[in-house]
Amino acid sequence: MALALGGCGDDEPAWCASSGPPQVSCAGPHCVLGVVVDYKRLEPRGYRVFALDGDAINRAKAETIARDHVETVLGGEKDGVTDCERDEDFLHCIVQYPTADRWLLVLHGLTGEVVYVGFEEWAGSKNRGADAELPAGFLDGRTLGCAGPAPEPERKQLILTNTGPLAGPPPSSARDALGVARETDAVVQFVGDKTYSAMVINRSPAIGGIDPESTDWLVWLYLR
């Protein structure tokens, strides 16, 4: 971890070079910041602020929202089997279909809003690496700048949704990804001196195992 961050000093990583002030203003009643961190390289790849409004949902409602989002909004298959798990202020949901393809969705539990959706398949997934397309609406964060670290979150959830075998030790952990995110200008400015919570979840496009080259950490921060 120390090598990955380098303290943003003499040996600071390339992503510490700033490309300008991050766009982290939020006027919504519920403010969430998502940061994509490369699983293998431990580098921030992108970020997005969500200004959310809505009503709190339970697990059953989340499963309905997730399935409807895939089948109606995205035009996916019908009759998916949905399973959601709640982790403090967020829910992560898997929608599985008979073809064995599936979708991973992250919902904000206090508003019912979908903040991430990603497709997973058994075979044919392309390695993404650091040049992969970011989730919709995310801004490039590869030269986001170091201003941290931001303070520790009040509470955090570190989730693994895909724990398939690797050829060697995992190159990074959810705790590492949160540490990288806390060093970025976006998180430092978004959090300020406010209390916040965090959830970190891994996302691999291939079901049945993790390819370090094609996996990201998704770090979610919610102001309390």
Image (cartoon, grey):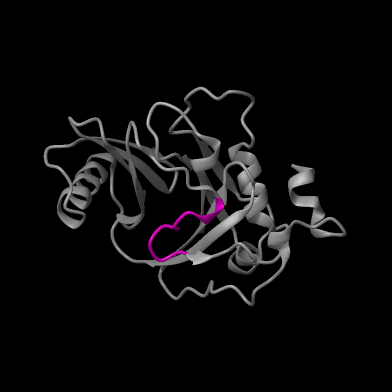
Which is more toward the observer, 128 or 203?
128
Q: Quadrant of residue 82?
A: top left
Which is more toward the observer, 190 or 142?
142
Q: Is residue 54 left or right of residue 207?
A: left
Which is more toward the observer, 67 or 169?
169
Q: Residue furthest right?
A: 10
Residue 147 image point, x, y percent = 73, 65
Which is more toward the observer, 129 or 203?
129
Q: Is residue 80 left or right of residue 48?
A: left
Residue 109 seen in the figure: no
Residue 169 image point, x, y percent = 64, 26
Q: Is residue 108 left or right of residue 25?
A: left
Quarter holding the N terminus is top right
Q: Residue furthest left?
A: 78
Residue 21 seen in the figure: yes
- Residue drawn where x is 67% and y is 48% of the image: 179
From this view, report whether residue 143 is shown above or below residue 7: below
Residue 157 image point, x, y percent = 52, 40
- Residue drawn where x is 32% and y is 40% of the image: 93
From this view, report whether residue 133 is shown above or below residue 83: below
- Residue drawn where x is 58% and y is 63% of the image: 141
From this view, report whether residue 133 is shown above or below residue 210: below
Q: Quadrant of residue 110?
A: bottom left
Mainly helix, strand or loop, the magenta region?
loop
Specify the segment rendered in magenta: 130-138
Q: Answer whether residue 216 is magenta in the image.
A: no
Q: Answer whether residue 131 is magenta in the image.
A: yes
- Residue drawn where x is 64% and y is 47% of the image: 42
